[in-house]
Structure formats: C-alpha cells, structure tokens
C-alpha cells in the first residue's frame, strides 16, 4: 500500500498536470454525485394521482304511436269514391208519418275516454226537450236524468201528444193576451230539440277535472209527419291544462231511436215491419301509425307517447331517486338568417308534472296534436302574423340523486324530441334515443418503489466519490520532491541573502598563484563577503554546493557536501 501511495505521489511530482487534472475530475464527479443525491431526494416518494372511481350512464328514449281516424290516405282505396252532388249541403232528414206510428223511444249513449287512467269518475246525464213554438216562443221540458261512471245509456219514451198539449196551452195563452178568439188548429208545426247535458267529474291522481258535454238532436213536427235529425253522433276531444299539467280526454255521444208501427197499417212499409230505427252507429276504426312518418293533424285522433329512462352504474348505489318532468314547448321558429333577432313567442305546457320515480321507469302521456295546431291558428289570428312551420318540442328532464361508496350522484339529464308543426303536417326527429355517460373522479396515493433505491445508491456513490476526492486531494497536497540537507541549506541561504549570493553554472578555476582559504560555514563566508564588498558565487552540483568569494589572489571557499 505504501509503495502504491509513493507511486501516486511520485507520479504527481513528476507530472504536475496529471495532479491538477485528477483533482478537477474527482471534484466534478463529486459535485455531480451531490446533484444526484439532491435529485433523488427531490423525487416524491408518494403522490396523488387522478382516478375514475365510478362510471355511470343516463339513457333516455322517446317512443310514440299516432292514432289516425279513418281516411283514404292510410286505408286501402275503395272500389268507388263518393261523388259530391252540386248544391247539396246536408243529408235530407228521414220523415215518418204520425198516423202510422204507435209509439217512439229515444236512447242516448255516452262514453268518457281519458287518455290515461283516472279514478273516482262520476257522470250525470240530464236530458231535456226544448220546444220552439209556432209563435217564436221556447220552452224547456225535462225528460230523463241518470248517473253513473265511465259510460251511460239512457232510454225514455217520446210522447209527442204531451208536447202538442204544451204547444196548445201556450198558444192559447198568447192569444188570450191579444183578446183574440182561440181555435185549436188541426195541425201543429213546431221544432223539438232533444238535448243531452252531461257533467263529468274525474280525479287524475293530482287534481279534479270537471267538464260539461252537450249534444242536441233536432226533431221537426209538421202536422202529419215527424222529421228526424241525421246527426246522431258527436265526438269531442278536449285538453285540460291545470296546476299539475295537461290532461287529455274524449267525449263520445250517440243518439238513437226506435219507432214502433201500427201493425194494422202495413201498406207503406210492408207486412211484418213493426219497428223503424236508424242504422246502428259503429265507432270509426282508429288506425295506429308507427314513428318516423309524416302525419296530418286533421286526421290525427291522438298521439300516445312514452319516455323511458335507465340509470346504469358500475358500482352499487343506494337511495336512488329520480324526479322527472315532461313538458311541451310550442314556439315561433327562430330566424337564423338574422343574428340577434328576438324570440317572437313561446308557450310551455306541462305534459307530465314533476313525479318521483326509483330505478328504471317508463312514463306514458298523450300529446294532442290538434290542440297545438289550433293554437297556432288562434295565435296567428291574434297577432296578425305567423310562420308556415312552428317548432314543437317535447322535453323530458330527469333529476337523478343517488349515493355510492365514493360519493353522491346529483345530476340532471335532459332528452328532447323535436318536431316541426306545419299548417297541414307534422314531423318528428327520427333520433329518439340519447345516452349520456358520466363519472365520479377521485385521487389515489401512488408510491414509487424505485425512489428508495435511488436515494440509497446516490448516497453510496457520493460517499465513494468523496473518499476518492479526499484521497486525490491529500496526495496532491503532500506530493512534494525530497530535498537534501545541502539543498535545504542552499534554499535558506538564498532566501536570506538573495542580494549577496549569485548562482553560477561553473566556478572559475583556481590560479596557480591564488591562495584558497577554506571557510568553516556559509555564514562566515557571507561575513567575509560583506567586509570585502564582494558577491558570494554559488555553484550547485548533484552531491555538493560550492560557495566562494574571490578577492584578487585570495579565494575564500565553503563546500557543502552530503
């Protein structure tokens, strides 16, 4: 080891440049190692990283069926089409001869049809006869009343003699007031209206709805005959917009009658014919049409729609509650060609009021297209302007709340079905499904297993390089050449008497006549030189140093040898 250390020191002594380079290189490596230690400890051992904790998805879907009244456009074409008679306004009323009639009976059938189930429905039917007398007077006579639910059928006899007595009495009273003699006419001509007044009350589940339906049937009595009305059926669809949303329903009324003939008078109608009545009424067959077509509001009976909602989550959820509301928005179309053009008008209708659900659900609700079509016509007349097509939008808004182990879910999902309501047609978008994904984001602690290794090995490398640097620096400091005693003496003398001692390469040879006087020490030689005012000549050789002062033929000399 000592030989190795001496070898290094000698190399440094022999090559000073190697010593400088070694010190610089080890210092640079030490500083780099120190930077590596700082970097290793600056690296985080743990950190927070974003992570998706919960994936969930809202799915909504609209669906609808359009129910169409009978017509040629959606039905098979008939073999022959009806021909319009010029100048014909209405169908001629059937006439029955009073002399052939034994008795008559009238029946009225009423059906209340809501577009979604209701409860506690009550129906009151009140039937009256309204007499229009020959002299222009009018009198109301009650005939029948009945109560029930959903639908009612009321039958009662029609006694024309009773009405004739009333006409006779009223006409007699009117003539007595004019002081004229009254004579009973042989024939009475008057009009009779049988009117059915229906009062309906039903509970939608949120509020009560009350409505009245009136259907008249006209009868003309002209002496020998009675003429019967041909309009015996009446259909009315209505909308109720209350506090809790819209409610659509339908009134259907149908009059019918039976006339029994005198069996002893078969000449006109033939033997065996004892009863006359109109053709039985058959409700029109409603045709169901699928989504995606072009529909005509004039032919639409009702559009029954539905909205389905599904909530999908990859984690267990608790306390899942959805609050859903369905609205219809009818508005004047936006004018895109004019930026910043103000909205003309817009109206919002609640189809399904806010309702709480849990889990996946489906809501069914009607949309009365005819109501919205008529509303656009009324508004067009009110404001004196209109567009050929209005925007009709159905919005379903679901507010979903739920709890998961990673946090709450509280979001609003909106799905829209857009339609274009024209003056004669209505179309809906074909895209009726919508999916909206969402997530709950969080953080997790991530640990790098390599960081402790980096820190350990960076410290070890720093320690090794520190030892190497100290080793090199120490040897660089102590790597000095070995100086002999005579060299040390020469250095001290040179340092002390630099103005007296002169280094020369070779001393002059002593002359024959010259006297050489040896001096015992260098100090004494210096003193002699000072007294003689002469320089001290110094010749350095490998094994000895010679100092001398020459004063003429006298030579004072001092020799320092190993």
Image (cartoon, rainbow, N blue to C red):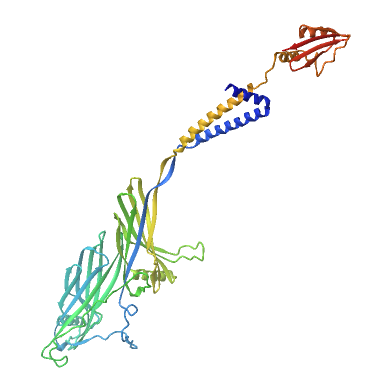
Q: Nearer the viewer, residue 484 or 79?
A: 484
Q: Residue at x 44, y 66 (%)?
A: 333
447 left or right of 514? left
Question: Within the image, what quadrant is residue 331 found in?
Answer: bottom left
Q: Nearer the viewer, residue 485 or 362?
A: 485
522 left or right of 414? right
Q: Is residue 157 above or below residue 478?
A: below
Q: Nearer the viewer, residue 382 or 209?
A: 209
Q: Residue furthest bottom?
A: 267
If the image is split into quadrants, where does the N terminus sit?
top right
- Determine if residue 492 is in view: yes
Q: Is residue 311 above or below residue 393?
A: above
Q: Residue at x 50, y 61 (%)?
A: 340
Q: Residue at x 43, y 66 (%)?
A: 332
Question: Within the image, what quadrant is residue 256 found in?
Answer: bottom left
Question: Within the image, what quadrant is residue 278 found in?
Answer: bottom left
Q: Is residue 273 above or below residue 39?
A: below
Q: Residue furthest front?
A: 512
Q: Residue furthest left?
A: 264
Labels in figure, total? 0
Residue 304, position as x, y percentages in the image: 31, 67
- Determine if residue 223 is in view: no
If the image is split into quadrants, where does the C terminus sit?
top right
Residue 114, position as x, y percentages in the image: 26, 67
Q: Residue at x 36, y 74 (%)?
A: 296
Q: Is residue 136 above or below residue 456?
A: below
Residue 502, position as x, y percentages in the image: 81, 16
Q: Nearer the viewer, residue 227 or 299?
A: 299
């Amino acid at each position: 080891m000592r030989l190795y250390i001496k070898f290094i020191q000698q190399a440094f002594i022999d090559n000073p440049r190697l010593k400088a380079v070694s010190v610089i290189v080890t210092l640079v490596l030490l500083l780099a190692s120190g930077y590596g230690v700082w970097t290793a400890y600056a690296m985080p051992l743990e950190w927070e990283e974003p992570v998706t904790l919960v994936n969930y998805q809202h799915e909504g879907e609209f669906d609808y069926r359009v129910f169409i009244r009978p017509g040629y456009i959606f039905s098979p074409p008939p073999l022959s089409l009806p021909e319009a008679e010029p100048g014909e306004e209405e169908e001629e009323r059937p006439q029955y001869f009073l002399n052939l009639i034994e008795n008559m009976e009238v029946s009225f059938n009423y059906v209340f049809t809501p577009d979604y189930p209701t409860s506690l429905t009550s129906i009151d039917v009140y039937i009256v006869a309204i007499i229009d007398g020959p002299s222009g007077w009018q009198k109301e006579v009650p005939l029948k009343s009945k109560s029930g639910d959903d639908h009612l059928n009321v039958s009662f006899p029609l006694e024309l003699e009773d009405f004739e007595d009333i006409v006779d009495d009223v006409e007699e009273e009117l003539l007595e007031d004019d002081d004229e003699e009254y004579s009973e006419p042989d024939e009475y001509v008057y009009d009779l209206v049988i009117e059915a007044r229906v009062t309906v009350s039903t509970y939608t589940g949120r509020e009560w709805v009350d409505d009245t339906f009136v259907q008249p049937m006209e009868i003309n009595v002209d002496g020998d005959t009675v003429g019967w009305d041909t309009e015996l059926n009446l259909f009315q669809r209505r909308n109720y917009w209350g506090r809790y949303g819209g409610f659509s329903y339908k009134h259907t009324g149908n009059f019918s009658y039976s006339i029994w003939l005198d069996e002893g008078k078969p000449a006109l109608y033939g033997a065996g014919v004892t009863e006359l009545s109109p053709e039985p009424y058959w409700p029109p067959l409603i045709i169901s049409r699928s989504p995606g077509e072009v529909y005509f509001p004039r032919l639409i009976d009702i559009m029954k729609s539905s909205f389905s909602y599904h909530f999908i989550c990859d984690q267990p959820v608790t306390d899942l509650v959805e609050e859903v509301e369905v609205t219809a928005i009818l508005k004047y179309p936006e004018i895109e060609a004019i930026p910043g053009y103000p909205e003309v008008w817009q109206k919002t209708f609640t189809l399904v009021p806010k309702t709480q659900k849990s889990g996946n659900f489906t809501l069914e609700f009607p949309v009365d297209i005819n109501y919205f079509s008529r509303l656009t016509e009324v508004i067009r007349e009110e404001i004196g302007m209109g567009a050929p097509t209005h925007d009709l939008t159905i919005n379903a808004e679901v507010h979903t709340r739920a709890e998961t182990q990673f946090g709450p879910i509280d979001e609003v999902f909106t799905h829209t079905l857009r339609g274009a309501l024209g003056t004669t047609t209505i179309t809906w978008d074909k895209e009726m499904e919508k999916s909206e994904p969402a997530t709950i984001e969080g953080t997790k602690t991530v640990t790098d297993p390599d960081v402790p290794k980096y820190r350990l090995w960076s410290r070890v490398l720093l320690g090794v390089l520190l030892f190497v640097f100290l080793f090199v620096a120490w040897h660089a400091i102590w790597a000095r050449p070995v100086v002999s005693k005579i060299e040390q003496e020469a250095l001290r003398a040179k340092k002390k008497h630099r103005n007296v001692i002169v280094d020369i390469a070779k001393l002059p040879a002593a002359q024959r006549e010259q006297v050489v006087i040896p001096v015992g020490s260098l100090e004494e030689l210096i003193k002699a030189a000072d007294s003689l005012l002469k320089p001290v000549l110094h010749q350095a050789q490998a094994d000895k140093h010679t100092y001398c002062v020459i004063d003429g033929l006298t030579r004072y000399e001092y020799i320092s040898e190993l």
